[in-house]
Image (cartoon, coloured by chain):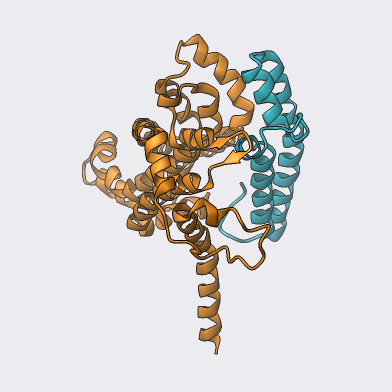
Chain colours: A orange, B cyan
Amino acid sequence: MKRVALYAAALAFTLFAGFPFYWMLVTTFKQNRDLYVGASDVSHIPWIFNDPPTLEHVKLLFGQTEFPRWVVNTLLVVAAVVVITVAVAVPAGYSLARLAGRWGERLGMGIFFTYLIPPTLLFVPFARLVSLLGLQDSLAALILIYPTMTIPFCTWLVMGFLRSVPWDIEEQAMIDGYSRLAVIVKVAPRLIVPGILTVIVFTFTLVLQEFVYALTFISSVDKMTVSLGVPIALVRGDVYHWGALMAAALFTSIPLAIVYNVFIDRFIQGFTMGAVKG
Amino acid sequence: MLPVVAVAVLFGVVYTATDLGVVYILTGGGPANTTHVLPTLAFQRGILGADLGQGAAIAVFLLPFLIVVAVAMLRIARRAEVGGAGGTGGAR
């Protein structure tokens, strides 16, 4: 009986979580005639295909917007930001967790608090900075600014993660004759791998969903990222091109869902270690 | 449980109060500026209106509000943790 209740609850949650994706799927392939009747016709069932599916929204997305271009832009930005974040946040987190003693903890909290200062407070000064550097309307602006939100969070993540990795292994290596530098180069990376994966996934997510900075810095259509270009191009005044919007959401979220599922075990491990201890 | 709830509330308030994207996409502050929140107003004046100073002033007006919430929540979290004793989290 208890087991039945458990499975029922799990099923309910699965349906709850999966429904948006189902809705995306249905909306993507519905004909407009089928999409826009709901309010006036009560007998119309919204969550099935009443008319045969169509590819017109997908054609609109790929043919009349620069969606593929935006995907490429997004991937470029994500790749650059991931490299920068890993290069900065992992060593920072490591040294704060292992080398800086009491102050490391406080400094780590300080770094994390800067993440709590939201982009909304920062986009105005950053707009000034970006225009001073002559980077308006270029992907370089995004690559420069995004690390300001990914690095603090990821540094803190790595710190929390490392606190759950026993120091003993590294100490052992030092007893066996490694210098501190050798420990950092040869031993530590292997211990941090799940942490690094978590950092990559988080950076990916943060950058992919970012809207405010992209909206502020990017104005030409061919430089936009997915999260900016899709709503800008497909919401025209009061007209929402729901089919194409949902198609964009679908084609962006499915690869992400696959990536997440591949990494999920390590991801959860890294995340909970970071979160619980931090 | 209370410290976690306090931190969750803190995050929730900060992210909701400073959310620009949702409001911007759904209404853009319109019709006739009736649905603006501080972030969208700051964006409209500062970036679209090209008056960075005014935009910054509007955005900074969020800060006192957020600080009050942040201090209150962190205080609750700390008190609960110190009072609750035990637990492995330590004093954070």
| Side of A176 relative to A142 (left or right) | left
Judge whether A111 appears above or below A257 on screen.
above
| Side of A56 relative to A123 (left or right) | left
Instruction: Name the residue located 47 percent from the left edge and 30 percent from the top edge.
Output: A146
- Camera-nearest residue between A7 and A248: A248
Residue A236: give x, y in percent of width and height. Answer: 57, 34
Residue A189: give x, y in percent of width and height. Answer: 29, 43
Instruction: Name the residue located 56 percent from the left edge and 82 percent from the top edge.
Output: A5
- Camera-nearest residue between A69 and A53: A53
Judge whether B53 appears above or below A54 on screen.
above
- Quarter of the rendering containing residue A177: top left
- Camera-nearest residue between B3 and B49: B49
User: Which residue occupies the extreme bottom position in the image?
Assistant: A1
Judge whether A223 appears above or below A179 on screen.
above
Residue A225: give x, y in percent of width and height. Answer: 43, 32
- Quarter of the rendering containing residue A265: bottom left
Instruction: Name the residue located 35 percent from the left edge and 47 percent from the top edge.
Output: A197
Judge whether B47 appears above or below A42 on screen.
above
